[in-house]
């Protein structure tokens, strides 16, 4: 089975590479520079890099400075759009970030794109790349053979701010530019942390499900929260409510992420057996200085 699957994935990755290059040549040619600062939060990874949580943190940071900020996300990422709106941040879901940014640029001080790392129409944007490992250089690392959407040589590295990311579960949190961790686990009966100890099934529809599961273990083990089972679903899964309903029907405690919770109706969110892991984003002082200096220079 492995012998058959691997050549198939490599062939598919080769076709993906050809389509990627053709799409950029025909549809993503560099366009006119925008006069409003644009920040693109991206990653070489296809998903699970923490783009949306960091985008939320970044928008709130500049809002606190009195800036008029809007976030652009892709309309296909419907659950991320809901998550952004829940944070009381202005957001537009669009299929064309560049066209939308050009249309609204005179209304805002800063435009932040949640993803769009491969959109080469933005010729003067500040691109922030969230790095969990070394950038890929071989097409064999591309989807579906690997977890990446583009290669290092596809980007002008001199215009990219690389930020190393880490979590407590992978022991990179102290040296990271940006660190992610579980801050609390809540349900409808608790404003802070769910009663512990308890045993739960983790159901995850994220780009990096294993990292989320490991973070839950790191947070939960000293608090008596035990993971009995895990269920992995696709990112942006529209059948997520049915999966949750099925598990709750069997009277099981469930832990999900904030993004996964955005796919659920209120009736499920208020179920006492459903627990939501709240994530926190911590940015180092050095990284904060870099971000502030770039935006202040562009908005001066």
Image (cartoon, rainbow, N blue to C red):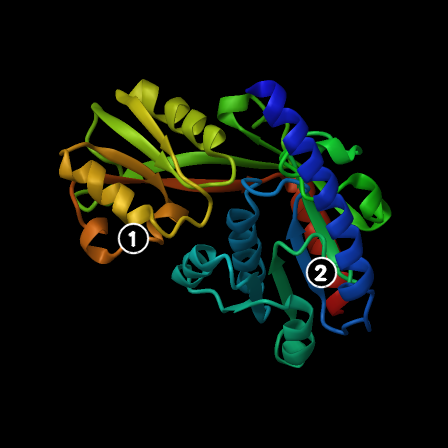
Rendering coords of residue 46 (x, y %): 61, 43
Q: Secondary structure at mark 1?
A: loop
Say whether residue 235 is left or right of residue 160: left
Say whether residue 25 is left or right of residue 202: right
Find disc 1 in the rendering and name its residue.
264
Of the pair 175 and 227, the residue shown nearer to us:
227
Look at 51% across and 40% down and name the residue there. Answer: 207
Q: Secondary structure at mark 2?
A: helix
Rendering quarter of residue 246: top left
> Does residue 66 appear in the picture of this structure?
no
* Residue 33 vertical position relative to residue 134 in the rendered view, above or below: below
Rendering coords of residue 95 (x, y %): 59, 67
Rendering quarter of residue 152: top right
Rendering quarter of residue 165: top right
Q: In terms of sequence position, does the residue under pointer 1 or pointer 2 come before the other?
A: 1
Look at 41% across and 23% down and name the residue there. Answer: 218
- The quarter of the rendered structure image containing the C terminus is bottom right
Find disc 2 in the rendering and name its residue.
295
**Label 2: few (<14), some (14–19) or many (≥20) C-alpha neighbours in 10 Å:** some
Q: Nearer the viewer, mark 1 or mark 2?
A: 1
**Label 1: few (<14), some (14–19) or many (≥20) C-alpha neighbours in 10 Å:** some
* Residue 105 vertical position relative to residue 215 in the rendered view, above or below: below
Of the pair 76 and 14, the residue shown nearer to us:
14
- The quarter of the rendered structure image containing the N terminus is top right
Rendering coords of residue 294 (x, y %): 75, 56
Look at 14% across and 39% down and name the residue there. Answer: 249
Residue at mark 1 to residue at mark 2: CA–CA distance = 36 Å
Look at 51% across and 42% down and name the residue there. Answer: 281
> Does residue 32 appear in the picture of this structure?
yes
Of the pair 4 and 247, the residue shown nearer to us:
4
């Amino acid at each position: 089975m492995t012998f058959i699957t691997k050549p198939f994935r490599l062939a598919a990755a080769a076709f993906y590479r050809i389509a990627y290059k053709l799409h950029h040549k025909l549809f993503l040619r560099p366009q006119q520079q925008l006069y409003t600062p644009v920040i693109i939060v991206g990653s070489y990874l296809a998903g699970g890099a923490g783009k949306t949580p960091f985008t939320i943190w970044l928008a709130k940071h500049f809002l606190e400075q009195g800036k008029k900020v809007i976030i652009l996300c892709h309309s296909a990422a419907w659950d991320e759009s809901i998550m952004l709106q829940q944070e009381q941040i202005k957001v537009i879901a669009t299929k064309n970030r560049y066209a939308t940014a050009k249309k609204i640029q005179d209304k805002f001080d800063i435009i932040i794109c949640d993803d769009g790392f491969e959109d080469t129409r933005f010729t003067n944007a500040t691109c922030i790349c969230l790095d969990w490992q070394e950038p890929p250089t071989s097409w064999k690392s591309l989807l579906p053979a690997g977890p990446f959407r583009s290669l290092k040589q596809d980007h002008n590295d001199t215009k990219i701010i690389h930020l190393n990311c880490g979590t407590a579960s992978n022991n990179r949190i102290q040296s990271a530019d940006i660190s992610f961790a579980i801050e609390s686990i809540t349900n409808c009966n608790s404003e802070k942390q769910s009663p512990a100890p308890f045993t739960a099934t983790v159901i995850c529809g994220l780009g990096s499900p294993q990292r989320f599961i490991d973070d839950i273990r790191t947070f939960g083990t000293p608090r008596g929260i035990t993971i009995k089972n895990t269920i992995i679903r696709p990112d942006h899964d529209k059948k997520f409510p049915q999966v949750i309903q099925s598990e709750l029907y069997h009277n099981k405690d469930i832990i999900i992420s904030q993004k996964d919770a955005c796919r659920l109706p209120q009736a499920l969110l208020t179920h006492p057996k459903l627990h939501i892991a709240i994530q926190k984003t911590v940015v180092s002082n050095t990284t904060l200085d870099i971000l502030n200096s770039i935006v202040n220079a562009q908005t001066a």
